[in-house]
Image: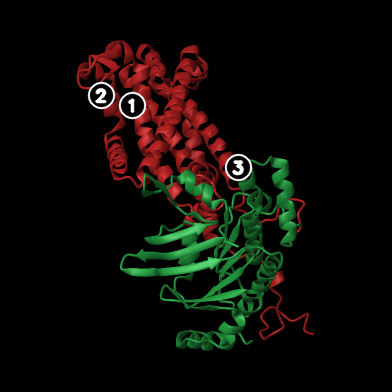
Chain colours: A red, B green
Amino acid sequence: MTVTAPPTTTGPGTHDVADARPRFRPWRWVATAVLALVAAQILTFLVTNERFGWDVVAAHLFAPSVLAGLGTTVLLAVLAMLIGSVLGGLLAAAQLSGFGPLRWAATTYVGVFRGIPPLVQLIFWFNLAYLLPEISIGIPFGGPDLVSWNANDLITPLTAGVIGLSLVESAYLAEIIRAGVLGVDQGQREAASAMGFTPLQTFFRIVLPQAMRVIIPPSGSQFISVLKGTALVSVIAMNDLLHSVQVIYNQTYEIVPMLLVACIWYLTVVTLLTIGQRRLERRFARGHVRTAPTGGAS
Amino acid sequence: MSPVLSLRGTTKRFGDHTALDAVDLDVAEGEVVVVIGPSGSGKSTLVRCVHQLESVDGGGMYLDGELLGYSEHRGALRPLTPRGTAAQRRRVGMVFQQFNLFPHFSALRNVSEAPRRVHGRTAGEAEREATALLDRVGLGDRLHHYPRQLSGGQQQRVAIARALATRPRILLFDEPTSALDPELVEEVLGVLRGLARDGLTMVVVTHEMAFAREVADRVVFMEAGRIVETGPPAQIFGSPRSERLHSFLSRHTREVPA
């Protein structure tokens, strides 16, 4: 045995890789130094530049009008996401349908509402009264009306915002859901129908839970983008988060500090959403890890 | 006694290709029919059609005398609604080549889900029965494992338990061992032997000639969408009448010595 042999010795039996040390990676040290430098620079800038006005930020962060704006923003995002999910699910089903006209209608819908900028759609819905002075439910093509509303009363900034954002969301979510459903193996559907499940049971018990794994990550991004998209409703004079800080800085001219207030709240909500998304992902990852269940032998 | 399953002139086409060409077949109560034949001979299509995973283009299929997939309405045949088809499928069990277990359910839930959701059993009842069935296929200690945590042979045995859970009139097996590693084939065939002994009515599509010879009450040899020859295993394997069966067997028994 040559236990004391120097590590330069070659030949079988003279080495043990268990004693190896990690590889020396000089570029990682360089990268760490550069990143630390940049971070320090940004931090110094944030702290020493008085124009950020952190005292103003602190004073307005929990101002009632800002919190009300935040509430409106979250409400709008949640409503758009809920309505968008339901509509998107129906649209995805229609796009996957074997019935041509339904498929074409859904594809056209997705094309239109995904193709027009959300800002344009919001202004359009806000001005719906110009196109349809009266909105009514009744017999089509000149039949009597059963219920009717004045469009100007019905289309408030809130309804215009909810309609506009929901329609855009539904178009994006339809694509996400469709891709998720297509990703589920055909054999799953066959096995489910072999068990005697009806088409609805097959969809809700077998296909959708598996598709959720693929649907959740992009839907999470979509929720985040609709939350940020709510800032657009400030152009139709809705009191969302952005609008609430605009009202303040239009009087005080503290534009940057007030925008920072909005940034902090947007980032807070987005971070909470991201945490929620990760939890959901773990929940639907059931059965997709190879480790044995706790307490079971493998 | 009238047969459990009857096929009369069953025909299936995929475009120009005729996958099933006017097939006639009767399967009696408690009978084990093993279907053999080269790839593309229509054996898989046969069981998939019986299970209505494929629509047929001609002829009729009957389960306990009831026409499958269609009902007569004012003298004309109309396809059944999805609900009606589902009701017929509940009386037929199917085991797939690729297992097709539900990956998001545990082994226990894979087996108990259909009795609960489709047959209206209570959760407790369904789980008790599922536990017994998984015990029967030798997996009583794997109840809470997910499919991905099981070997191929174990997954296929769960799939068999799942097919049994709905108490079908007839069980169809579509090449149940073809996706398995060679050393896992035997554990699945062992379960199939047990079911045959218990008197279940089965149609098994397989390439396992030794199994066919041992377990089948009747062997069906298919080629090019037709049933070329049918008979007890001793006759099919001992004295094949057609030239095509003869050459098929000489190709296959080289791999699987008797």
Identify the residue at horizontal 58%, vertical 84% (top origin). Answer: B235
User: Crowding near pointer 3: few (<14 within 10 Å), some, many (20+)?
Assistant: some
Q: Chain of mark 1?
A: A
* Amino acid tagged 1: Gly
Q: Is residue B142 visible?
A: no
Q: Is residue B41 visible?
A: yes
Which picture quadrant has residue A94? Answer: top left
The foreground one among A36 and A241 is: A241
Q: Where does the image place residue B164, in percent across and percent down from the top left?
A: 65, 56
Q: Look at the numbered discs 1 and 2 and tell me whether their residues touch, using CB distance below 8 Å.
A: yes
Q: Are marks 3 and 2 on the same chain?
A: no
Residue indicated by mark 3: B117
Identify the residue at horizontal 37%, vertical 61% (top origin). Answer: B58
Residue indicated by mark 1: A164
The label nearer to you, 1 versus 3, is 3
Q: Where does the image place residue B224, in percent across and percent down from the top left?
A: 41, 76
How much space separates mark 3 and mark 2, taking CA atoms? 47 Å
